[in-house]
Image: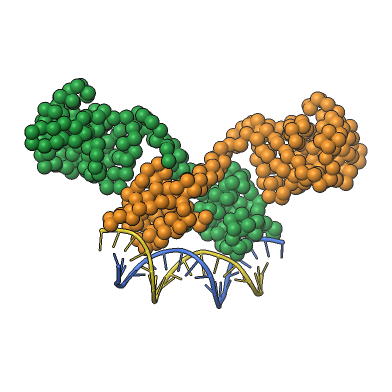
Chain colours: A green, B orange, C yellow, D blue
DNA sequence: ATTACTAAGTTACGAGTAA
DNA sequence: TTTACTCGTAACTTAGTAA
C-alpha cells in the first residue's frame, strides 16, 4: 500500500465514503490532499484498479464509495493507531529456549539470593534458570518493564565478590507461572532468565530451540506516560 | 507532512518510541517499512531535521525517541481515524443565509402540507422557509441523513398539480429549534430549507449572507453501517 | 557493525490538452 | 464544466561506498 494512496483513501473516508456514496470532483479532492487535479485523478484511478474504491463517473464529478477491501485497509490502520495510544496492560514476548552456560545455576544457589527469594517471592527456586532468547528488537519492551512494579532483590557481598541488585517480575511462560529475573543495573541482554519452584523444562515440556510465549502483566507503579 | 515520513513515524511509535527510547538500526527499520537501508536512513534524517524524533547515534544502531511534535502529528492522525470509525451522533453543517424565490412561502401555505405539519410536527409553520446555502461538498452528509429517523409528510394532489413526499428532520440553527425540510425524492440541492412556528430571520437575528451553524441529531432508525 | 554521502536509476508530479 | 492522457521535469529511491 503506497502511503500517498492511503492518504487519499483516508480523505475519502473523512468525507463519508465509508458509509455513503460521495459526490466529489478530482479537483476538489486535489485541494484536500494538496496535489494537482491530475495527480488526484491518477490516485483515484489507482485506488479503483486496486479495488479499494468503487466509482461511477458522471458527466460532472464522480460518485465514489470505499469498498470492503478499502475499509479493511483503513481499519487495519486504525487498529495500529489504537495500539500506539493504548497503554498496554500486558507485555508479550515470543522467544526460543536456549541453554545457558551454567551461571543461572550458580546464582540461584547463592545463599544471599535464596534467602531473599524465600522471603520476597515465597519459595526457594529450583536451581538454575530457564533461558529464553528473544528478538533483539523486543529488548525495547524491557525498557517499559523497568518502569513497572517489581520485587527487588538487594545486592550483597561474599568474601569473593559482589552480587548486584536484581528485579523480579511475575511472568507467564505458556501460561505457567514463573518469575523473570533481570539485573537492575546495566544493559539488557536478549536472553531472559526465568525462575520457578520447579524444573521449568519438564514443567513446560520444552527443550532447546522450542518457541515459547511470555506474558508479563504490568501493574502500574507510576505513569508510563511521562516525557 | 509527507506521507512516507508519517509511515516511518508510525512504525517507530509501534515499536514503542512514544514512551521509550528505542534501539534500532536503519536496516531493521528499512525491513519494517519495506525500503532500503539508505532510504530508511534518509527518512530518519528528515524526521530528525523536522524535530519529530530525537536520536543518539552510537557505534552500533541508534537510540530513537519520538518528540512532543512527533506525538502531536500521530495524535492528529489517530483523531482522524476515530472520526472515520465513530458513528456520528450529530451532523454539523455551516452555511449562509440566502433568499429563496418565494417557493418556500408557496409550499408552506398549501393546505395539504399545513395539515400534516400540524398533525405530525405539532405546529403550523410560519409561512415561508429559511434558506441556507451549504458548501456543495457538504451535500454528501445529506445522504447519511436519509438513513435516519425522519417524519415524512405524504404527497398529495390538488386540482392543479402533485406535491411530493417530504422528509422533516428536527434541526438546530444557532441552537434555535427548527425543522429541516427535504424532498424525499430527487437530488439534493445545496440549499437547505428550514421551517419553524416563528419568523426565523427575526428569531435568529440574521439576514442574507450571515453564516449560521446547523446541527442535526441522528436518532438511528436502522444501522448506518450496512454495505 | 553501523550511518549516510554521491551518483545514477526510477517513479511520481503537473502543465498542456483531448475528449 | 468534467476526467484523464502525454510527456518533460522534479522528486524519490537505491547501489556503491566512505567513514
Left or right: A66, with B149 as reference point = left
Would you place residue B78 above or below residue A113 in this image? below
Q: Which quadrant would the C terminus of chain A be assigned to in this image?
A: top left
Q: How many marks?
A: 0
Residue drawn 65% across the image and 35% down it: B90
Would you place residue A160 above or below residue B100 in this image? above
Left or right: A198, with B1 as reference point = left
Left or right: B70, with B175 as reference point = left
Would you place residue B77 above or below residue B220 in this image? below
Would you place residue D9 above or below residue B152 in this image? below
Residue A41's quadrant in the figure? bottom right
The image position of residue B46, as x and y in percent, is: 45, 59
The image position of residue B196, as x and y in percent, is: 82, 32
Residue drawn 46% across the image and 51% down it: B52
The image position of residue B43, as x and y in percent, is: 42, 58
Residue drawn 57% across the image and 58% down it: A44
Residue D18's quadrant in the figure? bottom left
Residue C16's quadrant in the figure? bottom right
Pick the residue in front: A79 or B66: B66
**In this orientation, does residue B227 appear?**
no
Residue drawn 14% across the image and 42% down it: A99
**In this orientation, does residue B41 appear?**
yes
Q: Residue furthest right?
A: B159
Pick the residue in front: A103 or B136: A103
Q: Residue furthest front?
A: A159
Amino acid at each position: 500500500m503506497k502511503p500517498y494512496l492511503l492518504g487519499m483513501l483516508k480523505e475519502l473516508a473523512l468525507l463519508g465514503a465509508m458509509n455513503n456514496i460521495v459526490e466529489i470532483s478530482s479537483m476538489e479532492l486535489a485541494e484536500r490532499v494538496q496535489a494537482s487535479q491530475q495527480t488526484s485523478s491518477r490516485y483515484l484511478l489507482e485506488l479503483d484498479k486496486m479495488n479499494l474504491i468503487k466509482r461511477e463517473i458522471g458527466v460532472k464529478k464522480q460518485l465514489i464509495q470505499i469498498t470492503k477491501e478499502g475499509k479493511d485497509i483503513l481499519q487495519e490502520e486504525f487498529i495500529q493507531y489504537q495500539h500506539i495510544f493504548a497503554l498496554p496492560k500486558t507485555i508479550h514476548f515470543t522467544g526460543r529456549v536456549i541453554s545457558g552456560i551454567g551461571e543461572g545455576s550458580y546464582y540461584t544457589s547463592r545463599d544471599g539470593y535464596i534467602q531473599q527469594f524465600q522471603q520476597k517471592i515465597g519459595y526457594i527456586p529450583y536451581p538454575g534458570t530457564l533461558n529464553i532468547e528473544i528478538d533483539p528488537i523486543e529488548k525495547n519492551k524491557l525498557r517499559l518493564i523497568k518502569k513497572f512494579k517489581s520485587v527487588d532483590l538487594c545486592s550483597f557481598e561474599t568474601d569473593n565478590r559482589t552480587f548486584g541488585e536484581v528485579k523480579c517480575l511475575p511472568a507467564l511462560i505458556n501460561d505457567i507461572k514463573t518469575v523473570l529475573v533481570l539485573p537492575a543495573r546495566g544493559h539488557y541482554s536478549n536472553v531472559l532468565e526465568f525462575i520457578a519452584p520447579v524444573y521449568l523444562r519438564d514443567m513446560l515440556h520444552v527443550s532447546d530451540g522450542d518457541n515459547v510465549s511470555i506474558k508479563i502483566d504490568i501493574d502500574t507503579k507510576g505513569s508510563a506516560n511521562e516525557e
